[in-house]
Image: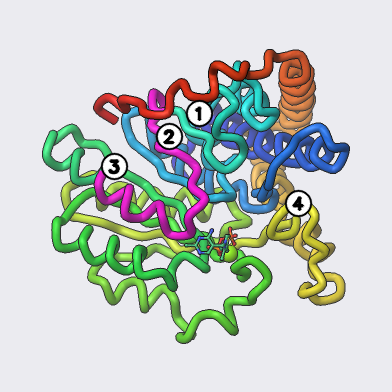
Amino acid sequence: MNLSRDQLLRAYRQMKTIREFEERAHAEIMNGQIAGFTHLYTGQEANAVGVCEHLDHQDTIISTHRGHGHCIAKGADVIGMMKELWGSAEGLCKGKGGSMHVADIEKGILGANGIVAGGPPISVGSALAAKIRKNGRVAVSFSGDGSVNQGTCFEAMNLAVVLKVPAVFVIENNYYSEHTNISYAVGCDDLKARTEGFGFPVFVADGADFFSVYDAAGKAIEHARSGNGPAGVFAETGRFHGHFVGDPQYYRADGELDDLRENSCCLKNFRARVDGGGVVSAEELDAIDAEVMALIDEAVSAARAAARPTAEQVTEDVYIQYGSA
Ligand SMILES: Cc1ncc(C[n+]2csc(CCOP(=O)(O)OP(=O)(O)O)c2C)c(N)n1
Ligand SMILES: [Mg+2]
């Protein structure tokens, strides 16, 4: 695959940053330091990074309730995000969004989104804006296996084809919608085929493998950017934590989580893939690990020390102008 050394190092750093952001957020929530409801993305990092490495700040993404990874992959400031989780006035959204509503319009991050399948229709709007303005941008929505049973998702996919807009629908199949397995919740055996039934190509990826996602996403994004209308990416993936932090996960099979961490870890897979290739060394990846850990420590210290919003600030920014994004 045609990836430069810098691109490889950057992709690994992004995945590692998401992993450690999530693991630390998990620990801080369990310690009672972060309030609110949180869904962790750990295990799915290759999907966010494999897609967003094809995008720049002009392109847009719309995320989900499990959105930290998508936002970091798209370039959100990690310290600002940690402050946001802490509910600080210095957070990316002044502490008013929290985990499920991180957004950064300047970076093309139209927001995490607590409504399952709320993202695909927004991405069609953003893609329509790109088509009208002829600016070559694409609009990506991330959503889960649970989202593809929602009417909003069907409507968005159909409308994207009808309008022939540069929308890319990334479906992350982690096999669960809350606690319900896909085998119970989805009425057909082939979600890819069902999605293609709307009339656009869908590229399948192994969501534990950055290179697989990067390849599939590259084809989908190229298709959309070239004016051919929407495309999809369908990634098989696994989440290492529960649906939400605190989920006892009684619905998991014995050994399922251990197996996921052992055999479906994108960081391990990345290391195995580049090992011995002579382009990136294990020592360089170790150095990145250390830098990421230092960044996450810095983010937590900064979040702990950051100012809380005042009572007067509660009514500020209730309505906001989003500019041209
Ligand atoms: C419209 C809507 N219905 C139900 C919910 C409750 N809910 C929150 S997350 C979730 C499951 C989503 O599953 P999936 O799309 O597979 O994403 P994942 O949690 O696996 O990342 C549900 C049903 C919601 N937030 N919005
Ligand atoms: Mg799911």
Disc 2 residue type? Ile
- Callout 1 secondary element: loop
Give the CA distance from mark 3 to mark 4. Answer: 33 Å
Q: Which mark is residue 183?
A: none
Q: Nearer the viewer, mark 4 or mark 2?
A: 4
Q: Nearer the viewer, mark 2 or mark 3?
A: 2
Q: Which residue is mark 3?
A: 138
Give the CA distance from mark 1 to mark 4. Answer: 24 Å
Residue interval drawn in magenta:
105-125
Cβ at disc 2 under 8 Å from ligand 1 = no
Give the CA distance from mark 2 to mark 3. Answer: 12 Å
Is label 2 in contact with label 1 (beta carbons under 8 Å)?
yes
Residue 309 appears in the figure = yes
Left/right placement of residue 93 relative to residue 242 reads left
Q: Which mark is residue 109?
A: 2
Q: How many marks?
A: 4
- Rendering coords of residue 130 (x, y %): 20, 38
Q: Which mark is residue 75?
A: 1
Give the CA distance from mark 1 to mark 3. Answer: 16 Å
Q: Which quadrant of the render holds ligand 2? A: bottom right
